[in-house]
Amino acid sequence: MPSGTQRPYVVAHVAVSADGATTGFQPDVARFYQLAQTWKEDLTLTGADTILAQEPALATAELPGPAPDGPLLAVVDGRGRVGRWEALSRAGHWSGVVALHCRDTPPRPPGRPVRELVTGAGRVDLDDALRTLGRDDGVGVVRVDSGGALIGALLGAGLVDEISLLVHPCLAGERATRHWYGAAPAAGLALVAAQSLPGELVWLRYHPR
Ligand SMILES: NC(=O)c1ccc[n+]([C@@H]2O[C@H](COP(=O)([O-])OP(=O)(O)OC[C@H]3O[C@@H](n4cnc5c(N)ncnc54)[C@H](OP(=O)(O)O)[C@@H]3O)[C@@H](O)[C@H]2O)c1
């Protein structure tokens, strides 16, 4: 990758309980996706575990086909665990789908209905993947859809420009299996917006300093 290739703007938009969980409570999905339109992302970036959690629903969902005006979907799948690529591409949300693999990803069946981008050795090189998608697909804005692990990896690598938390008025407690997390930059987070919304929701937006 030539140095100087610009990385897209990356925002992690996540629905959380008041105790920071991303699972174990019922999020306001309609509000979550309404707010997600704020950034008009060129690419939705998600992790294999987020997709695997949706696979049962995908198996029975109506699949209208690709959305020509929708964003691209890129799925980090370093271990080659995702199977329903055809269903993802036809889910009606995305214009196309890219599987992000690394050199250690197990061999894939030939003729899979998904484009591949291979970068990194033991794990997907997230920085290189973002820059490559920026250069080759004109991706300028990325919205991360993650239950925590992918946000943590991106934050740890300094690859997040904005964190958006839709805070729900509940405690997930022991029902939670995931929390959002990440290595904060030394200077912490700068609050750029805090808004109360109907349903006792609070929308918080931060920039890593
Ligand atoms: N509340 C919300 O807004 C929200 C949003 C999305 C999902 N969810 C829920 O969250 C759960 C899934 O979240 P999760 O935290 O388990 O997984 P995740 O956010 O989907 O992240 C897992 C992905 O991150 C990759 N990864 C982790 N560390 C990495 C690193 N250092 N370098 C490169 N790649 C790295 C993993 O790679 P490998 O492929 O190599 O393992 C895996 O593909 C599901 O239950 C889902 O329903 C909630």
Image: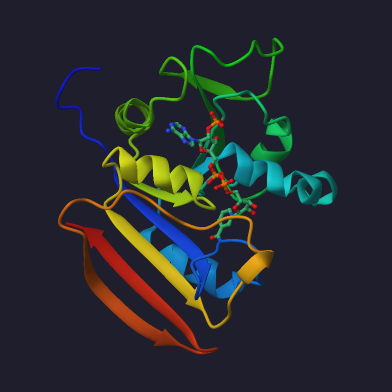
Q: Position of residue 123 (x, y in %)?
A: 46, 23
Which residue is drawn at the image coordinates 67% and 28% (left, top)?
A: 81
Q: Can residue 5 be seen in this view?
A: yes
Q: How many labels does the image show?
A: 0
Q: In this view, does 207 lie above or below 44?
A: below
Q: Is residue 44 visible?
A: no
Which residue is drawn at the image coordinates 80% and 47% (left, top)?
A: 56
Would residue 153 be found to the left or right of residue 66 on screen? left
Would residue 179 be found to the left or right of residue 143 on screen? right
In this view of the protein, which residue sits in the foreground, 127 or 184?
184
Q: Position of residue 93 (x, y in %)?
A: 60, 50
Q: Is residue 148 above or below residue 52?
A: below
In this view of the protein, which residue sits in the foreground, 70 or 131?
131
Q: Where is residue 161 in the image (x, y as percent from the top left)?
A: 26, 52
Image quadrant containing the C terminus? bottom left
Q: In this view, does 104 lie above or below 64?
A: above
Image quadrant containing the N terminus? top left
Q: Where is residue 22 in the image (x, y as percent from the top left)?
A: 56, 61
Task: State the residue lying farthest toward the right.
Answer: 60
Would residue 31 be found to the left or right of residue 61 on screen? left
Q: Is residue 27 above or below residue 198?
A: above
In this view of the protein, which residue sits in the foreground, 55 or 158?
158
Which residue is drawn at the image coordinates 37% and 50% (left, top)?
A: 182
Image color mode: rainbow
Q: In which quarter of the image is ligand 1?
A: top right
